Amino acid sequence: MNGSAVTARRLGLINCHDCHLLVEAHQVAIHPRCPRCGAHLHARKPNSLARTWALVWAAIILIVPANVLPITITSALGTKQADTIMSGVIYFMQTGSWEIAAVIFIASVFVPFAKLLILVFLLLSVRCRTAWRPKDRTTLYRLTELVGRWSMVDIYVVTILVALVKLGAVATIEAGPATVFFASVVVLTMFAAESFDPRLVWDVIEEDA
Amino acid sequence: MVAGSDRRGPGQMSNETPMSRHHTRHVHPDPPPDTDLSAAVAALSADSGPTVIVACHDCDLLNRLPGQSTATILCARCGAVLRRSKPNSIERSLALTLCGLILFVLSNSFPFLAMKTGGFIQETTLLTGIHELWKQELFGLATLVLLTCVLVPLAQMTGLLYILAPLHWGRRPAPFAARVFRLVQEVAPWGMMEVFMVGILVALVKLGHMATIVPGVSVFSFGTLIFVMAAAFTTLDPPLLWDRLDLRR
Ligand SMILES: [Zn+2]
Ligand SMILES: [Zn+2]
């Protein structure tokens, strides 16, 4: 089935990324913009694999300080307490707000790691030219696009805490160094998911068929 | 000026709608397809009646869609959503966008949380929160929050208003409307108001252990805004809009 699939590329057509108009490839060679919406046209996202790898590697490196360094520093009555993402989760579990603990754990720990693992898996599967379950891999890709944004929750919590709790001598909350690393991880993985082209999953199967 | 899909080939392969009739033309694929492909194209366009050929954005498969249909259509190979039916989409999205803009102004004018400890009352609006990050020299974070919670949503709403209002009042599309719509679609992943709302709820619980927290007007208008904006984008019908905004008219 895959070998005989009629794709836009096999018919010499390019699908506009923005408005989904089909444009003939030889027209694009002369005029690289979409005649309907003006977007730049490419048969596949340019340098998809190299760009995605680079962004994924950067995120893998930054996710370490994001989890090890403190994300908030609370000073109350002369004592200072530094909290990492995980110690925040544990604090919520101990104080009985386990729903909040679950939200933070899923958004700040589970989603970023899962997203990086899925992207690495997709990149490797394209490199190995596997024909294994392309439909499920495409679904996985759509999932990473959908859930990545939710990792920003912790950044927003820190913003609100920092803005609200500045009561001078009584208590202050400062944003710790991990906030910058963590925000970078979220942004980098969003760009990585953006730059990966799921059509490559299908292309290698068609080429090998 | 020639676009591949706006054409009616020998096999009735066309994405013609009544509005795009002026732009159809015959086409002879170059180079000519092998017999295998011609057969497949013939199969794709077997039915008579207006049909649309679209390429799947996730796997590049060409799918044939019926011209008029109220069903949701999925890609035959990978299951991506190719089209959803959206009745009265321009009027509905326009009404929701206007409503969203009003709620947006409300949300940014009033404090969303107030905190009482002893004699202190500390109030925060979204913008003072961002200003506080800036004062702590967290410039990157301040910019990120400003972009994702204020500027991107604002750009999306004003952009939609700019595109939809002229179409609704029956005028020609506004200048650069196609470019504006492209921008609205491209910035969409970076608008994160609903994520911010969850952040507010988490902060409420966290601070509840330290002090008395009073949710402000803004929390409620912000919560409503999220649903209104989600509805505005769900009622939006991009294929219809692209047809109306076509640069070639
Ligand atoms: Zn286009
Ligand atoms: Zn598909």
Image (cartoon, rainbow, N blue to C red):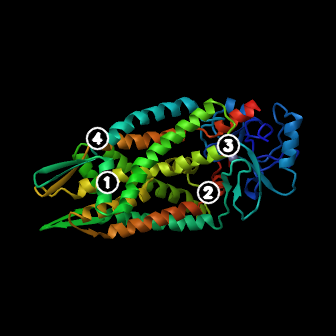
Sort mark 2 into few (<14), some (14-19) or many (20+) by Cα contacts within 10 Å: few
Callout 1: helix, strand or loop?
Answer: helix
Residues marked 1 and 3 touching at CB (< 8 Å): no
User: Looking at the image, how many numbered discs can be counted on the residues?
Assistant: 4
What kind of residue is marked 4?
Answer: Leu
Q: Of the numbered discs in the image, which one, if any, rests on residue A90?
A: 1
Q: Which residue is mark 4?
A: A69
Q: CA gap, disc 2 to disc 4?
A: 55 Å
Label 1 within 8 A of ligand 2 by Cβ: no
> In which quadrant of the rendered view does residue A31 lie?
top right
Q: Residues at marks 4 and 3, common chain?
A: yes
Q: Chain of mark 2?
A: B
Q: Can residue A156 be seen by looking at this rendering? A: yes
Q: Point out which mark residue B221 bears.
A: none
Foreground label between 2 and 3: 3
Label 2 sits on a secondary structure element that is loop
Q: Which mark is residue B172?
A: 2
- Confirm or deny contact between disc 2 and disc 3 (CB under 8 A): no
Residue bearing the label numbered 3: A133
